[in-house]
Image (spheres, rainbow, N blue to C red):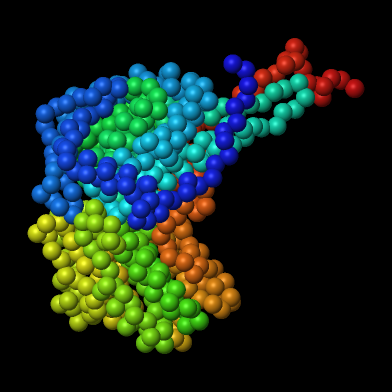
Amino acid sequence: MNGIPAIPVPVNEPVFSYEPGSPERAELEAELEAQASEVVDIPLVIGGEEVRTGDTFDVVMPHDHGHVLARAHRAGPDEIRRAVAAARDAHRAWSTARWDDRAAVFLKVADLLAGPWRQRLNAATMLGQSKNPYQAEIDSACEIIDFFRFGAHFAEQIYAMQPISDPGVWNRSEYRALEGFVYAVSPFNFTAIGANLPGTPAMMGNVVVWKPASSAMLSSYLVMKLFEEAGLPPGVINMVAGDAVRITNELMTDQDFAGVHFTGSTGVFRSFWKTIGDHIGEYRSYPRIVGETGGKDFIWAHPSADPDAVRTAIVRGAFEYQGQKCSAASRAYVPASMWAELEGPLVEETASLTMGDVRDFSNFLNAVIDRNAFDKIVGYIDDARASDDAEVLVGGESDDSVGWFVRPTIIRALKPDYVTMCDEIFGPVMTVYVYDDNAWEETLDLVDSTSPYALTGAIFARDRRVIRMATDRLDQAAGNFYVNDKPTGAVVGQQPFGGSRASGTNDKAGSMMNLLRWVSARSIKENFVPPTDYRYPFLESE
Ligand code: NAD
Protein backbone atom coordinates (compact mmCIF):
# COMPACT_ATOMS: atom_id res chain seq x y z
CA MET A 1 0.00 0.00 0.00
CA ASN A 2 2.61 2.54 1.02
CA GLY A 3 5.17 3.52 -1.58
CA ILE A 4 5.86 6.14 -4.19
CA PRO A 5 5.42 4.46 -7.58
CA ALA A 6 7.97 5.16 -10.32
CA ILE A 7 6.75 5.24 -13.90
CA PRO A 8 9.04 3.18 -16.18
CA VAL A 9 11.30 5.54 -18.14
CA PRO A 10 9.84 5.64 -21.68
CA VAL A 11 11.61 5.14 -24.98
CA ASN A 12 9.90 5.56 -28.35
CA GLU A 13 8.18 2.43 -29.61
CA PRO A 14 10.23 0.90 -32.45
CA VAL A 15 8.56 1.06 -35.89
CA PHE A 16 8.08 -2.35 -37.55
CA SER A 17 9.25 -2.56 -41.17
CA TYR A 18 6.60 -4.87 -42.72
CA GLU A 19 9.14 -6.13 -45.22
CA PRO A 20 8.14 -9.21 -47.24
CA GLY A 21 8.43 -12.37 -45.13
CA SER A 22 8.27 -10.52 -41.78
CA PRO A 23 5.94 -11.92 -39.10
CA GLU A 24 4.23 -8.53 -38.65
CA ARG A 25 3.36 -8.44 -42.35
CA ALA A 26 1.73 -11.87 -42.22
CA GLU A 27 -0.22 -10.94 -39.10
CA LEU A 28 -1.37 -7.64 -40.61
CA GLU A 29 -2.48 -9.30 -43.85
CA ALA A 30 -4.57 -11.84 -41.95
CA GLU A 31 -6.16 -9.06 -39.90
CA LEU A 32 -6.94 -7.00 -43.02
CA GLU A 33 -8.68 -9.95 -44.57
CA ALA A 34 -10.69 -10.65 -41.43
CA GLN A 35 -11.83 -7.05 -40.97
CA ALA A 36 -12.66 -6.63 -44.66
CA SER A 37 -14.97 -9.62 -44.49
CA GLU A 38 -17.24 -8.37 -41.71
CA VAL A 39 -19.52 -5.40 -41.06
CA VAL A 40 -19.03 -4.14 -37.52
CA ASP A 41 -22.00 -2.78 -35.63
CA ILE A 42 -20.62 0.24 -33.73
CA PRO A 43 -22.66 1.30 -30.70
CA LEU A 44 -22.37 4.39 -28.56
CA VAL A 45 -20.51 3.65 -25.33
CA ILE A 46 -22.16 5.33 -22.34
CA GLY A 47 -21.29 4.50 -18.76
CA GLY A 48 -19.62 1.32 -19.95
CA GLU A 49 -22.75 0.17 -21.76
CA GLU A 50 -23.09 -0.33 -25.49
CA VAL A 51 -26.07 1.70 -26.63
CA ARG A 52 -27.75 1.15 -29.98
CA THR A 53 -30.24 3.69 -31.31
CA GLY A 54 -30.92 2.01 -34.65
CA ASP A 55 -30.27 5.31 -36.41
CA THR A 56 -27.04 4.37 -38.21
CA PHE A 57 -24.59 5.65 -40.81
CA ASP A 58 -22.19 3.67 -42.99
CA VAL A 59 -18.42 3.61 -42.49
CA VAL A 60 -16.78 2.73 -45.82
CA MET A 61 -13.30 2.12 -47.22
CA PRO A 62 -12.20 5.38 -48.91
CA HIS A 63 -10.25 3.34 -51.53
CA ASP A 64 -13.31 1.13 -52.21
CA HIS A 65 -16.29 3.22 -51.20
CA GLY A 66 -18.83 0.58 -52.12
CA HIS A 67 -17.45 -1.59 -49.32
CA VAL A 68 -19.16 -0.99 -45.97
CA LEU A 69 -16.87 -1.78 -43.05
CA ALA A 70 -19.19 -0.80 -40.24
CA ARG A 71 -22.50 0.76 -39.30
CA ALA A 72 -22.30 3.27 -36.51
CA HIS A 73 -25.21 4.34 -34.31
CA ARG A 74 -26.04 8.03 -33.96
CA ALA A 75 -26.76 9.58 -30.58
CA GLY A 76 -30.00 11.50 -30.14
CA PRO A 77 -30.59 14.19 -27.49
CA ASP A 78 -31.36 11.55 -24.87
CA GLU A 79 -28.11 9.63 -25.41
CA ILE A 80 -26.08 12.85 -25.39
CA ARG A 81 -27.55 13.78 -22.00
CA ARG A 82 -26.95 10.24 -20.72
CA ALA A 83 -23.30 10.47 -21.74
CA VAL A 84 -22.90 13.65 -19.68
CA ALA A 85 -24.68 12.05 -16.74
CA ALA A 86 -22.45 8.97 -16.95
CA ALA A 87 -19.35 11.15 -16.94
CA ARG A 88 -20.69 13.10 -13.95
CA ASP A 89 -21.38 9.88 -12.05
CA ALA A 90 -17.85 8.61 -12.66
CA HIS A 91 -16.18 11.87 -11.63
CA ARG A 92 -15.75 11.45 -7.88
CA ALA A 93 -14.27 7.97 -7.88
CA TRP A 94 -12.00 8.51 -10.89
CA SER A 95 -10.73 11.97 -9.99
CA THR A 96 -9.72 10.70 -6.54
CA ALA A 97 -8.43 7.31 -7.69
CA ARG A 98 -4.81 6.54 -6.87
CA TRP A 99 -2.32 7.77 -9.45
CA ASP A 100 -0.73 4.34 -9.84
CA ASP A 101 -4.13 2.87 -10.73
CA ARG A 102 -4.79 5.54 -13.34
CA ALA A 103 -1.29 5.22 -14.75
CA ALA A 104 -1.59 1.44 -14.86
CA VAL A 105 -4.65 1.63 -17.13
CA PHE A 106 -2.83 3.73 -19.72
CA LEU A 107 0.48 1.87 -19.44
CA LYS A 108 -1.54 -1.27 -20.06
CA VAL A 109 -3.17 0.31 -23.12
CA ALA A 110 0.36 0.91 -24.46
CA ASP A 111 1.53 -2.63 -23.76
CA LEU A 112 -1.59 -4.26 -25.22
CA LEU A 113 -1.11 -2.18 -28.33
CA ALA A 114 2.60 -2.98 -28.55
CA GLY A 115 1.60 -6.65 -28.48
CA PRO A 116 -1.71 -8.39 -29.18
CA TRP A 117 -3.74 -5.36 -30.30
CA ARG A 118 -1.21 -3.88 -32.70
CA GLN A 119 -2.40 -5.33 -35.98
CA ARG A 120 -6.10 -5.05 -35.07
CA LEU A 121 -5.79 -1.31 -34.77
CA ASN A 122 -3.39 -0.97 -37.71
CA ALA A 123 -5.74 -2.91 -39.99
CA ALA A 124 -8.75 -0.82 -38.92
CA THR A 125 -6.78 2.39 -39.56
CA MET A 126 -5.64 1.16 -42.97
CA LEU A 127 -9.09 0.07 -44.11
CA GLY A 128 -11.15 2.86 -42.55
CA GLN A 129 -8.84 5.84 -43.07
CA SER A 130 -6.97 4.58 -46.17
CA LYS A 131 -3.41 4.42 -44.87
CA ASN A 132 -0.57 2.23 -46.09
CA PRO A 133 1.04 -0.15 -43.54
CA TYR A 134 3.84 2.24 -42.63
CA GLN A 135 1.52 5.24 -42.17
CA ALA A 136 -0.77 3.11 -39.99
CA GLU A 137 2.12 1.71 -37.96
CA ILE A 138 3.54 5.13 -37.05
CA ASP A 139 0.05 6.35 -36.13
CA SER A 140 -2.18 3.71 -34.60
CA ALA A 141 0.62 1.65 -33.05
CA CYS A 142 3.70 3.74 -32.26
CA GLU A 143 2.21 7.15 -31.58
CA ILE A 144 -0.54 5.91 -29.27
CA ILE A 145 1.97 3.80 -27.34
CA ASP A 146 4.28 6.81 -27.05
CA PHE A 147 1.44 9.17 -26.03
CA PHE A 148 0.60 7.05 -23.00
CA ARG A 149 4.08 5.92 -21.95
CA PHE A 150 5.49 9.44 -22.21
CA GLY A 151 2.26 10.91 -20.86
CA ALA A 152 2.50 8.87 -17.65
CA HIS A 153 6.15 9.90 -17.31
CA PHE A 154 5.28 13.61 -17.74
CA ALA A 155 2.34 13.34 -15.34
CA GLU A 156 4.68 11.93 -12.73
CA GLN A 157 6.90 14.98 -13.17
CA ILE A 158 3.92 17.31 -12.80
CA TYR A 159 2.81 15.62 -9.58
CA ALA A 160 6.39 15.89 -8.28
CA MET A 161 6.43 19.69 -8.78
CA GLN A 162 6.08 20.84 -5.18
CA PRO A 163 6.59 24.20 -3.51
CA ILE A 164 9.17 25.11 -0.86
CA SER A 165 8.21 25.38 2.82
CA ASP A 166 9.26 27.68 5.64
CA PRO A 167 10.14 26.16 9.03
CA GLY A 168 7.04 24.98 10.85
CA VAL A 169 4.99 24.87 7.68
CA TRP A 170 4.45 22.24 5.01
CA ASN A 171 3.30 23.46 1.60
CA ARG A 172 1.97 21.05 -0.96
CA SER A 173 0.49 21.21 -4.46
CA GLU A 174 -2.30 18.93 -5.52
CA TYR A 175 -3.05 18.59 -9.22
CA ARG A 176 -6.80 18.08 -9.24
CA ALA A 177 -8.86 16.95 -12.19
CA LEU A 178 -11.07 19.68 -13.63
CA GLU A 179 -14.46 20.06 -11.97
CA GLY A 180 -16.85 18.79 -14.62
CA PHE A 181 -16.29 16.86 -17.86
CA VAL A 182 -13.95 17.33 -20.81
CA TYR A 183 -15.36 17.21 -24.34
CA ALA A 184 -12.90 15.54 -26.75
CA VAL A 185 -13.52 16.03 -30.49
CA SER A 186 -11.13 14.22 -32.82
CA PRO A 187 -10.34 14.41 -36.57
CA PHE A 188 -10.29 11.61 -39.12
CA ASN A 189 -6.63 11.68 -40.00
CA PHE A 190 -4.86 10.14 -37.00
CA THR A 191 -6.11 7.26 -34.89
CA ALA A 192 -3.51 8.40 -32.35
CA ILE A 193 -5.16 11.81 -32.01
CA GLY A 194 -8.44 9.99 -31.43
CA ALA A 195 -6.82 8.06 -28.57
CA ASN A 196 -4.95 11.03 -27.13
CA LEU A 197 -7.75 13.61 -27.00
CA PRO A 198 -9.93 11.64 -24.55
CA GLY A 199 -7.12 9.48 -23.09
CA THR A 200 -4.76 12.17 -21.82
CA PRO A 201 -7.36 14.17 -19.85
CA ALA A 202 -8.62 10.84 -18.44
CA MET A 203 -5.12 9.89 -17.36
CA MET A 204 -5.00 13.16 -15.39
CA GLY A 205 -8.18 12.14 -13.55
CA ASN A 206 -10.82 13.76 -15.76
CA VAL A 207 -14.03 12.27 -17.10
CA VAL A 208 -14.67 12.68 -20.80
CA VAL A 209 -17.32 12.64 -23.50
CA TRP A 210 -15.58 11.79 -26.76
CA LYS A 211 -16.92 12.43 -30.26
CA PRO A 212 -14.68 10.82 -32.90
CA ALA A 213 -14.79 11.83 -36.58
CA SER A 214 -17.50 9.88 -38.44
CA SER A 215 -15.02 8.57 -41.03
CA ALA A 216 -12.70 7.20 -38.32
CA MET A 217 -15.37 5.31 -36.38
CA LEU A 218 -13.91 1.85 -36.91
CA SER A 219 -10.50 2.58 -35.39
CA SER A 220 -12.07 4.84 -32.75
CA TYR A 221 -14.39 2.07 -31.59
CA LEU A 222 -11.42 -0.29 -31.27
CA VAL A 223 -9.58 2.37 -29.23
CA MET A 224 -12.62 2.52 -26.93
CA LYS A 225 -12.58 -1.28 -26.57
CA LEU A 226 -8.86 -1.13 -25.86
CA PHE A 227 -9.41 1.39 -23.05
CA GLU A 228 -11.99 -0.96 -21.55
CA GLU A 229 -9.73 -4.00 -21.97
CA ALA A 230 -7.04 -2.13 -20.05
CA GLY A 231 -9.41 -1.62 -17.12
CA LEU A 232 -10.75 1.90 -17.59
CA PRO A 233 -13.81 2.13 -15.31
CA PRO A 234 -17.26 2.69 -16.89
CA GLY A 235 -18.20 6.31 -17.48
CA VAL A 236 -14.68 7.73 -17.45
CA ILE A 237 -14.67 7.99 -21.26
CA ASN A 238 -18.02 7.93 -23.06
CA MET A 239 -18.06 7.67 -26.84
CA VAL A 240 -20.84 9.30 -28.85
CA ALA A 241 -21.30 9.68 -32.59
CA GLY A 242 -23.73 11.47 -34.84
CA ASP A 243 -24.65 15.07 -35.60
CA ALA A 244 -21.53 17.02 -34.55
CA VAL A 245 -23.32 20.36 -34.21
CA ARG A 246 -26.14 18.97 -32.09
CA ILE A 247 -23.75 17.06 -29.80
CA THR A 248 -21.53 20.11 -29.41
CA ASN A 249 -24.41 22.46 -28.64
CA GLU A 250 -25.74 20.12 -25.99
CA LEU A 251 -22.37 19.57 -24.30
CA MET A 252 -21.05 23.11 -24.49
CA THR A 253 -24.10 24.59 -22.85
CA ASP A 254 -23.91 22.29 -19.81
CA GLN A 255 -22.78 23.99 -16.60
CA ASP A 256 -20.34 21.11 -15.96
CA PHE A 257 -18.55 21.59 -19.29
CA ALA A 258 -14.97 22.01 -18.04
CA GLY A 259 -12.92 22.01 -21.23
CA VAL A 260 -12.64 21.03 -24.86
CA HIS A 261 -9.77 19.00 -26.33
CA PHE A 262 -10.06 19.44 -30.06
CA THR A 263 -8.06 18.70 -33.18
CA GLY A 264 -9.53 19.55 -36.56
CA SER A 265 -10.12 22.49 -38.82
CA THR A 266 -9.72 26.13 -37.87
CA GLY A 267 -13.31 27.14 -38.67
CA VAL A 268 -14.80 24.51 -36.36
CA PHE A 269 -12.48 25.50 -33.51
CA ARG A 270 -13.40 29.16 -33.91
CA SER A 271 -17.08 28.23 -33.72
CA PHE A 272 -16.38 26.37 -30.45
CA TRP A 273 -14.64 29.40 -28.98
CA LYS A 274 -17.57 31.59 -29.94
CA THR A 275 -20.13 29.22 -28.38
CA ILE A 276 -18.09 29.10 -25.18
CA GLY A 277 -17.88 32.89 -25.15
CA ASP A 278 -21.63 33.18 -25.57
CA HIS A 279 -22.21 30.92 -22.54
CA ILE A 280 -19.31 32.01 -20.35
CA GLY A 281 -21.53 33.14 -17.49
CA GLU A 282 -23.21 29.75 -17.21
CA TYR A 283 -20.31 27.44 -16.45
CA ARG A 284 -19.11 26.35 -13.03
CA SER A 285 -15.49 27.11 -14.09
CA TYR A 286 -13.80 28.84 -17.00
CA PRO A 287 -13.46 26.02 -19.54
CA ARG A 288 -10.02 25.00 -20.77
CA ILE A 289 -9.92 25.49 -24.54
CA VAL A 290 -7.28 23.42 -26.31
CA GLY A 291 -7.35 23.16 -30.09
CA GLU A 292 -4.82 22.10 -32.71
CA THR A 293 -6.12 23.20 -36.08
CA GLY A 294 -5.18 23.77 -39.73
CA GLY A 295 -1.88 24.40 -41.46
CA LYS A 296 -0.30 25.64 -44.66
CA ASP A 297 3.08 24.14 -44.10
CA PHE A 298 6.09 25.33 -46.04
CA ILE A 299 9.40 24.20 -47.45
CA TRP A 300 11.84 27.02 -48.18
CA ALA A 301 15.04 26.24 -50.03
CA HIS A 302 18.11 28.49 -50.21
CA PRO A 303 20.44 28.35 -53.23
CA SER A 304 23.02 26.58 -51.02
CA ALA A 305 20.65 23.67 -50.26
CA ASP A 306 21.07 20.12 -51.51
CA PRO A 307 18.48 19.68 -54.34
CA ASP A 308 18.13 15.94 -53.72
CA ALA A 309 17.23 16.59 -50.09
CA VAL A 310 14.70 19.24 -51.15
CA ARG A 311 13.12 16.91 -53.72
CA THR A 312 12.78 14.06 -51.22
CA ALA A 313 11.31 16.37 -48.58
CA ILE A 314 8.73 17.64 -51.07
CA VAL A 315 7.69 14.15 -52.18
CA ARG A 316 7.50 12.64 -48.70
CA GLY A 317 6.34 15.80 -46.95
CA ALA A 318 3.55 16.62 -49.40
CA PHE A 319 2.29 13.25 -50.55
CA GLU A 320 2.56 10.73 -47.72
CA TYR A 321 -0.94 9.91 -46.51
CA GLN A 322 -2.24 11.83 -49.55
CA GLY A 323 -1.23 15.15 -47.98
CA GLN A 324 -3.84 14.67 -45.26
CA LYS A 325 -1.54 15.40 -42.36
CA CYS A 326 -1.93 18.74 -40.65
CA SER A 327 1.87 18.95 -40.99
CA ALA A 328 1.94 18.09 -44.72
CA ALA A 329 4.07 20.40 -46.84
CA SER A 330 1.82 22.21 -49.31
CA ARG A 331 3.82 25.22 -50.48
CA ALA A 332 7.47 25.36 -51.49
CA TYR A 333 9.78 28.27 -52.29
CA VAL A 334 12.61 27.25 -54.59
CA PRO A 335 15.38 29.49 -56.02
CA ALA A 336 15.46 29.72 -59.83
CA SER A 337 18.99 28.27 -60.07
CA MET A 338 17.92 25.14 -58.18
CA TRP A 339 14.57 24.84 -59.98
CA ALA A 340 16.39 24.43 -63.29
CA GLU A 341 17.79 21.10 -62.07
CA LEU A 342 15.03 20.14 -59.61
CA GLU A 343 11.93 20.40 -61.80
CA GLY A 344 12.60 17.44 -64.10
CA PRO A 345 13.44 14.85 -61.41
CA LEU A 346 10.67 16.15 -59.11
CA VAL A 347 8.03 15.83 -61.81
CA GLU A 348 9.31 12.42 -62.84
CA GLU A 349 9.40 11.10 -59.28
CA THR A 350 5.92 12.43 -58.53
CA ALA A 351 4.55 10.83 -61.69
CA SER A 352 6.06 7.50 -60.65
CA LEU A 353 4.39 7.32 -57.23
CA THR A 354 2.14 4.28 -56.91
CA MET A 355 -1.46 4.71 -55.74
CA GLY A 356 -4.29 2.31 -54.97
CA ASP A 357 -5.85 0.00 -52.39
CA VAL A 358 -4.18 -0.25 -48.98
CA ARG A 359 -4.15 -4.06 -49.18
CA ASP A 360 -1.67 -3.85 -52.06
CA PHE A 361 1.47 -2.98 -50.08
CA SER A 362 3.27 -1.67 -53.16
CA ASN A 363 1.17 1.51 -53.07
CA PHE A 364 2.80 4.66 -51.71
CA LEU A 365 -0.49 6.59 -51.80
CA ASN A 366 -4.06 5.54 -51.16
CA ALA A 367 -7.40 7.36 -51.36
CA VAL A 368 -8.49 10.66 -49.83
CA ILE A 369 -10.95 10.36 -46.99
CA ASP A 370 -14.37 11.07 -48.52
CA ARG A 371 -16.48 12.64 -51.25
CA ASN A 372 -16.26 16.14 -49.76
CA ALA A 373 -12.48 16.03 -49.61
CA PHE A 374 -12.30 14.64 -53.16
CA ASP A 375 -14.55 17.39 -54.57
CA LYS A 376 -12.69 20.13 -52.72
CA ILE A 377 -9.24 18.96 -53.88
CA VAL A 378 -10.34 18.44 -57.48
CA GLY A 379 -11.92 21.92 -57.42
CA TYR A 380 -8.58 23.53 -56.55
CA ILE A 381 -6.82 21.56 -59.30
CA ASP A 382 -9.44 22.48 -61.91
CA ASP A 383 -9.16 26.15 -60.95
CA ALA A 384 -5.36 25.98 -61.28
CA ARG A 385 -5.70 24.47 -64.76
CA ALA A 386 -7.96 27.35 -65.77
CA SER A 387 -5.87 30.09 -64.17
CA ASP A 388 -3.27 32.30 -65.84
CA ASP A 389 -1.47 32.52 -62.50
CA ALA A 390 -0.76 28.82 -62.15
CA GLU A 391 0.35 25.80 -64.10
CA VAL A 392 -0.26 22.13 -63.25
CA LEU A 393 3.15 20.48 -63.79
CA VAL A 394 2.26 16.89 -62.93
CA GLY A 395 -0.70 14.91 -61.61
CA GLY A 396 -4.13 16.41 -61.31
CA GLU A 397 -5.94 13.31 -62.54
CA SER A 398 -8.73 12.02 -60.34
CA ASP A 399 -11.01 9.00 -60.33
CA ASP A 400 -13.87 8.40 -57.91
CA SER A 401 -15.36 5.34 -59.57
CA VAL A 402 -14.03 2.81 -57.01
CA GLY A 403 -12.35 4.96 -54.39
CA TRP A 404 -11.65 8.67 -53.93
CA PHE A 405 -8.32 8.79 -55.75
CA VAL A 406 -6.43 11.97 -56.66
CA ARG A 407 -2.99 11.70 -58.27
CA PRO A 408 -0.21 13.57 -56.45
CA THR A 409 -0.15 16.99 -58.02
CA ILE A 410 2.43 19.76 -58.35
CA ILE A 411 1.23 23.22 -59.26
CA ARG A 412 3.59 26.02 -60.13
CA ALA A 413 2.27 29.35 -58.89
CA LEU A 414 3.31 32.33 -60.96
CA LYS A 415 2.48 34.75 -58.18
CA PRO A 416 3.30 34.14 -54.53
CA ASP A 417 -0.23 34.69 -53.24
CA TYR A 418 -1.96 32.37 -55.70
CA VAL A 419 -4.80 30.68 -53.82
CA THR A 420 -3.10 27.28 -53.47
CA MET A 421 -0.12 29.00 -51.81
CA CYS A 422 -2.53 30.29 -49.11
CA ASP A 423 -5.44 27.89 -48.48
CA GLU A 424 -5.27 24.58 -46.64
CA ILE A 425 -6.34 22.03 -49.28
CA PHE A 426 -5.68 18.87 -47.25
CA GLY A 427 -4.89 16.63 -50.18
CA PRO A 428 -1.94 15.53 -52.34
CA VAL A 429 -1.33 18.97 -53.84
CA MET A 430 1.97 20.85 -53.59
CA THR A 431 2.36 24.37 -54.98
CA VAL A 432 5.83 25.64 -55.86
CA TYR A 433 6.80 29.28 -56.18
CA VAL A 434 10.11 29.85 -57.95
CA TYR A 435 11.97 32.93 -56.72
CA ASP A 436 14.93 34.94 -57.96
CA ASP A 437 18.06 33.69 -56.13
CA ASN A 438 18.97 37.22 -55.06
CA ALA A 439 15.62 37.69 -53.37
CA TRP A 440 16.03 34.91 -50.83
CA GLU A 441 15.76 37.22 -47.82
CA GLU A 442 12.57 38.89 -49.11
CA THR A 443 11.18 35.42 -49.79
CA LEU A 444 11.39 34.69 -46.07
CA ASP A 445 8.95 37.57 -45.56
CA LEU A 446 6.60 35.92 -48.05
CA VAL A 447 6.84 32.60 -46.21
CA ASP A 448 5.93 34.35 -42.98
CA SER A 449 3.06 36.47 -44.26
CA THR A 450 1.34 34.47 -47.02
CA SER A 451 -0.95 32.32 -44.88
CA PRO A 452 -2.72 32.82 -41.53
CA TYR A 453 -1.38 29.48 -40.24
CA ALA A 454 1.79 28.71 -38.30
CA LEU A 455 1.95 24.94 -37.83
CA THR A 456 5.02 23.37 -39.45
CA GLY A 457 7.71 24.52 -41.84
CA ALA A 458 11.11 23.48 -43.13
CA ILE A 459 14.13 25.37 -44.37
CA PHE A 460 16.87 23.86 -46.50
CA ALA A 461 20.35 25.41 -46.70
CA ARG A 462 23.99 24.43 -46.30
CA ASP A 463 25.19 27.93 -45.44
CA ARG A 464 25.15 28.17 -41.63
CA ARG A 465 24.59 31.96 -41.61
CA VAL A 466 21.50 31.47 -43.76
CA ILE A 467 20.17 28.78 -41.44
CA ARG A 468 20.54 31.20 -38.52
CA MET A 469 18.91 34.12 -40.37
CA ALA A 470 15.98 32.08 -41.62
CA THR A 471 15.43 30.47 -38.22
CA ASP A 472 15.28 33.91 -36.61
CA ARG A 473 13.18 35.54 -39.32
CA LEU A 474 10.62 32.72 -39.22
CA ASP A 475 10.44 32.45 -35.43
CA GLN A 476 6.63 32.84 -35.36
CA ALA A 477 5.91 31.12 -38.68
CA ALA A 478 5.77 27.54 -37.38
CA GLY A 479 5.34 25.75 -34.04
CA ASN A 480 7.35 22.84 -35.45
CA PHE A 481 10.34 24.06 -37.42
CA TYR A 482 12.65 21.77 -39.37
CA VAL A 483 16.14 22.42 -40.69
CA ASN A 484 17.11 20.25 -43.65
CA ASP A 485 14.26 17.82 -42.99
CA LYS A 486 10.66 17.39 -44.14
CA PRO A 487 8.06 19.15 -41.95
CA THR A 488 6.07 15.99 -41.10
CA GLY A 489 6.61 13.03 -38.79
CA ALA A 490 6.87 14.63 -35.32
CA VAL A 491 7.60 12.04 -32.64
CA VAL A 492 6.23 12.15 -29.08
CA GLY A 493 8.99 13.06 -26.63
CA GLN A 494 11.22 14.34 -29.45
CA GLN A 495 9.35 17.14 -31.24
CA PRO A 496 6.35 18.24 -29.12
CA PHE A 497 3.69 19.07 -31.69
CA GLY A 498 1.50 22.11 -32.30
CA GLY A 499 1.33 25.53 -33.90
CA SER A 500 0.06 29.00 -33.17
CA ARG A 501 -1.68 31.79 -35.15
CA ALA A 502 -4.64 30.13 -36.95
CA SER A 503 -3.10 26.69 -36.31
CA GLY A 504 -4.14 26.37 -32.70
CA THR A 505 -3.45 27.06 -29.06
CA ASN A 506 -0.04 25.38 -29.35
CA ASP A 507 -0.45 23.24 -26.24
CA LYS A 508 1.94 20.67 -27.71
CA ALA A 509 0.23 17.30 -27.89
CA GLY A 510 2.07 14.56 -26.05
CA SER A 511 4.08 16.94 -23.87
CA MET A 512 3.89 18.13 -20.29
CA MET A 513 2.48 21.45 -21.59
CA ASN A 514 -0.65 19.67 -22.77
CA LEU A 515 -1.05 17.64 -19.58
CA LEU A 516 -0.97 20.81 -17.51
CA ARG A 517 -4.14 22.01 -19.23
CA TRP A 518 -6.08 19.09 -17.75
CA VAL A 519 -5.32 19.77 -14.10
CA SER A 520 -6.31 22.51 -11.73
CA ALA A 521 -3.76 22.95 -8.96
CA ARG A 522 -4.70 23.33 -5.32
CA SER A 523 -2.11 24.87 -2.98
CA ILE A 524 -2.27 23.51 0.55
CA LYS A 525 -0.48 25.20 3.43
CA GLU A 526 -0.35 23.31 6.71
CA ASN A 527 0.94 25.07 9.77
CA PHE A 528 2.49 22.62 12.25
CA VAL A 529 2.85 25.26 14.97
CA PRO A 530 0.00 27.75 14.50
CA PRO A 531 0.37 31.15 16.18
CA THR A 532 -1.74 31.58 19.28
CA ASP A 533 -1.54 35.36 19.65
CA TYR A 534 -2.66 37.84 17.00
CA ARG A 535 -0.12 40.52 18.04
CA TYR A 536 3.00 40.99 15.91
CA PRO A 537 6.30 41.97 17.62
CA PHE A 538 6.33 45.41 15.97
CA LEU A 539 3.22 46.32 17.93
CA GLU A 540 5.06 46.07 21.26
CA SER A 541 6.09 49.30 22.97
CA GLU A 542 9.82 50.10 23.27
P1 NAD B 1 -12.99 18.74 -39.07
O1 NAD B 1 -12.81 20.05 -38.43
O2 NAD B 1 -13.89 18.63 -40.23
O3 NAD B 1 -13.53 17.68 -37.99
C1 NAD B 1 -12.89 17.48 -36.74
C2 NAD B 1 -13.93 17.03 -35.73
O4 NAD B 1 -14.86 18.10 -35.53
C3 NAD B 1 -14.75 15.83 -36.18
O5 NAD B 1 -15.01 15.01 -35.06
C4 NAD B 1 -16.02 16.47 -36.71
O6 NAD B 1 -17.13 15.62 -36.66
C5 NAD B 1 -16.19 17.64 -35.78
N1 NAD B 1 -16.95 18.73 -36.38
C6 NAD B 1 -16.97 19.11 -37.69
N2 NAD B 1 -17.77 20.17 -37.86
C7 NAD B 1 -18.28 20.47 -36.65
C8 NAD B 1 -19.17 21.48 -36.17
N3 NAD B 1 -19.67 22.39 -36.99
N4 NAD B 1 -19.47 21.49 -34.87
C9 NAD B 1 -18.94 20.58 -34.04
N5 NAD B 1 -18.08 19.61 -34.41
C10 NAD B 1 -17.75 19.56 -35.72
O7 NAD B 1 -11.52 18.21 -39.43
P2 NAD B 1 -11.09 16.86 -40.16
O8 NAD B 1 -11.44 16.95 -41.60
O9 NAD B 1 -11.54 15.66 -39.39
O10 NAD B 1 -9.52 16.95 -39.99
C11 NAD B 1 -8.74 17.74 -40.81
C12 NAD B 1 -8.39 19.05 -40.16
O11 NAD B 1 -7.75 18.80 -38.91
C13 NAD B 1 -7.39 19.85 -40.96
O12 NAD B 1 -7.74 21.21 -40.91
C14 NAD B 1 -6.08 19.60 -40.24
O13 NAD B 1 -5.10 20.59 -40.44
C15 NAD B 1 -6.53 19.52 -38.84
N6 NAD B 1 -5.58 18.78 -38.01
C16 NAD B 1 -4.76 19.50 -37.21
C17 NAD B 1 -3.82 18.86 -36.43
C18 NAD B 1 -2.89 19.62 -35.54
O14 NAD B 1 -2.25 19.02 -34.70
N7 NAD B 1 -2.81 20.95 -35.68
C19 NAD B 1 -3.73 17.47 -36.47
C20 NAD B 1 -4.60 16.76 -37.30
C21 NAD B 1 -5.53 17.43 -38.06
Residue 1 shows in the view? yes
Query: Residue at 46% of width from left, 87% of height from top?
Result: 438
Query: Residue at 45% of width from left, 23% of height from top?
Result: 95
Number of marks: 0
Q: Is residue 299 left or right of residue 169?
A: left
Residue, far right: 542
Quadrant, the C terminus: top right
Indicate whether 10 appears above or below 528: below
Quadrant, the N terminus: top right
Indicate whether 321 appears above or below 209: below
Indicate whether 482 appears above or below 440: above
Q: Is residue 94 left or right of residue 272?
A: right
Residue, far top: 532
Q: Is residue 371 left or right of residue 127?
A: left
Name the spot of residue 32 as percent of width and height, x first.
25, 45
Name the spot of residue 359 as percent of width and height, x first.
24, 53
Query: Residue at 54% of width from left, 77% of height from top?
Result: 462
Residue 125 shows in the view? no
479 and 116: which one is in front? Answer: 116
333 and 248: which one is in front? Answer: 333
Name the spot of residue 479 as percent of width and height, x first.
46, 57
Name the spot of residue 14 as percent of width and height, x first.
47, 49
